[in-house]
Amino acid sequence: MVLLHRRFPLLTTVGALAASNLFLHFGYAYGPAFISPAVLLFLLVVRGRRALGWAMAGVAVLSYLGYAWSIGNVDFFHSVWVLTSNTLLMVVAELVRIASERRRERERTAEEEARRQASEERLTMAQELHDVLAHNISLIHVQASTALHLIDDNPEQARTALATIKTASKEVLGEMRSVLNVLREGAPRSPTAHLDRLDELIERSGQRVTLERNGSRPLPPQVERAAYRIVQESLTNAGRYAPGGDVRVLLDFGEDELLIRVTDTGATGPAPLADEGSGNGIPGMRERASALGGTLVAGPHGDGFQVEARLPLPKESS
């Protein structure tokens, strides 16, 4: 009956109770005949059929007490024992059911959290790819235009531009390979977006950039990545819309925030990519800052443009 119970819960429980009552009516001693109905009543509750389980438990108590009274056994303690044992069985079943439901709820919550984290990681990787591709392809475009313009009159400067193209294309391929490795194998990604690489970023930008650091302190990885990408995107925009201008990058490490300010003096020549931008640079930077609880303001500044971001920092441990 236990094997058929999942498919026929009512019929198997009634059959087990009937069999145990027949066992009593034929005068056999108390024993294993009560195990089968007890197991089936327990399974009814654990499998979520609580109303049916408690109803059948009441039927079982009445049938056992009815048999005892029919043979003249009206002992009060015997009746209490029958009622208490069945009630205890059902209470234990309820506790097991509750524990099982809580375990399933924890598992479901853990699965949802894992899916949420995986989704956030995919969004982060997509944003990283966007920033890397936008910066390096813009850089390649500008340097290629420079090389084509100077290849006849100034081959040495054209050679420098081509070397920059080679370096930028190698970096973007490396970034794409690392992200694809994460997607395919879950392999750890190298921390390429690091403020220690700002000098290299500035050198490859092909612009006149002044970097100023006020203070220094260890940063959480997400803050460091956001800061690097904000500077990177700001330099990309400066190269796209203000070629030939001077750019000043300020990193101010405060007690509770990191101030990032990138200011350019405006274009001194034609902007080769002015009409080719995706329009996602500033919104993307603002999203990065907002995700960390910070702010980002961007707009005209004198003849040029300025991006100012403030990223909150945890208090330094004493």
Image (cartoon, rainbow, N blue to C red):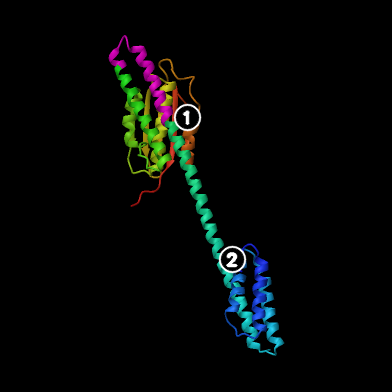
Q: Amino acid at mark 2?
A: Leu
Q: Measuring from the top left, give residue 178's x and y in whole percent.
A: 38, 36
Q: Main secondary structure of the magenta part?
A: helix
Task: Look at 60% across and 74% down and name the residue there.
Answer: 36
Give the CA separation, mark 2 to mark 1.
Answer: 64 Å
Disc 2 marks which residue?
3
Quarter of the image that includes the N terminus: bottom right
Residue 51 in sight from this viewpoint = no
Q: Which is nearer the N-term, disc 2 or disc 1? A: 2
Q: Which residues are magenta?
A: 132-158
Furthest residue in direction left, as rendered? 156
Q: Is residue 185 magenta?
A: no
Q: Is residue 154 magenta?
A: yes
Mark 2 or 1: in front is: 2
Q: Secondary structure at mark 1?
A: helix
Q: Measuring from the top left, give residue 184's x and y in whole percent.
A: 42, 40
Badge 2 density bin: few <14, some 14–19, many ≥20, Cα 10 Å: few
Q: Is residue 26 above or below residue 275?
A: below
Q: Amino acid at mark 1?
A: Gly
Please tell me how many numbered marks the rendered image carries: 2
Q: Is residue 101 above or below residue 36?
A: above
Q: Measuring from the top left, give residue 93's x and y in whole percent.
A: 58, 70
Residue 225 in sight from this viewpoint = yes
Instruction: Mark 2 and mark 1 in contact? Answer it, CB < 8 Å.
Output: no
Disc 1 marks which residue?
281
Task: Look at 32% across and 36% down and name the residue there.
Answer: 196
Is residue 176 found left or right of 20 in the rendered image?
left
